[in-house]
Amino acid sequence: MKGGRQLAHLHIASWVLALALVGMVTTFARSKNRKATKITHIILRVVFLLILYSGGSLFASYENYDGLIILKLLVGLWAIAAMEIATVKYVKQKPAVVWWVQLLIAVSLALLLGFGFLPMGVLP
């Protein structure tokens, strides 16, 4: 994997930033600060693009595509979709519990797959 470690750092930093921005969007929405909510949500969407770029580049850097790598790709896309839909529903004050639960499950699975089972992970 050429440049895999740098891509992995960019990818991890991107999703950590995305999760922080999700918290900020919900905090601003709760305090009824519409302008800050909208700006933060736009920044979150730009960070989604960074996650997709870094994740796609990591995916392309693998030489053998096994089932776990493809599963991680799908779970990552699920996590991004859950973040977007949960925040949009929260901002619009619509029921979003199902999407928050999906976000929790998707992020947990992505972390488990990314750090536990894939070659660049930290667990044995």
Image (cartoon, helix red, strand yellow):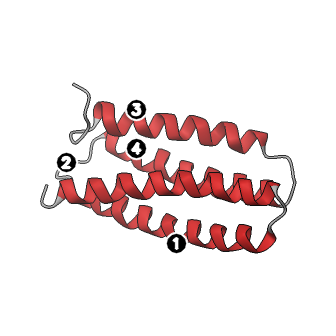
* Disc with the residue nearer the chain's start (2 vs 4): 2
Kind of residue sitting beneath label 1: Val
**Local crowd size for mark 2, using a 10 Å CA cut-off: few (<14), some (14–19), many (≥20):** few
* Disc with the residue nearer the chain's start (4 vs 3): 4
Whether tag 3 and tag 2 are in contact, CB under 8 A, the answer is no
Where, quadrant-wise, is the N terminus in this rendering?
Answer: bottom left
In the image, residue 39 above or below residue 9: below
* Disc with the residue nearer the chain's start (4 vs 1): 1
Kind of residue sitting beneath label 2: Asn
* Disc with the residue nearer the chain's start (1 vs 2): 1
Q: Nearer the viewer, mark 2 or mark 4?
A: 4
Rounded to the nearest whole Å, what is the CA distance between mark 1 and mark 3? 25 Å
Kind of residue sitting beneath label 3: Leu
Q: Residue at x 34, y 62 (%)?
A: 54
Whether tag 1 and tag 2 are in contact, CB under 8 A, the answer is no
Kind of residue sitting beneath label 4: Lys
- Circle 4 is placed at which residue position? 72
**Local crowd size for mark 1, using a 10 Å CA cut-off: few (<14), some (14–19), many (≥20):** few
- Circle 1 is placed at which residue position? 46
Q: Nearer the viewer, residue 71 or 123?
A: 123
**Local crowd size for mark 3, using a 10 Å CA cut-off: few (<14), some (14–19), many (≥20):** some
**Local crowd size for mark 4, using a 10 Å CA cut-off: few (<14), some (14–19), many (≥20):** many
Q: Nearer the viewer, residue 24 or 98?
A: 24
- The image quadrant of residue 39 is bottom right
* Disc with the residue nearer the chain's start (3 vs 2): 2
Q: Nearer the viewer, mark 3 or mark 2?
A: 3
List x then y, in percent, for residue 34: 80, 70
SS at mark 2 in the image:
loop
- Circle 2 is placed at which residue position? 64
Q: Which residue of the protein is positioned furthest toward the top in this rendering?
A: 124
- Circle 3 is placed at which residue position? 112
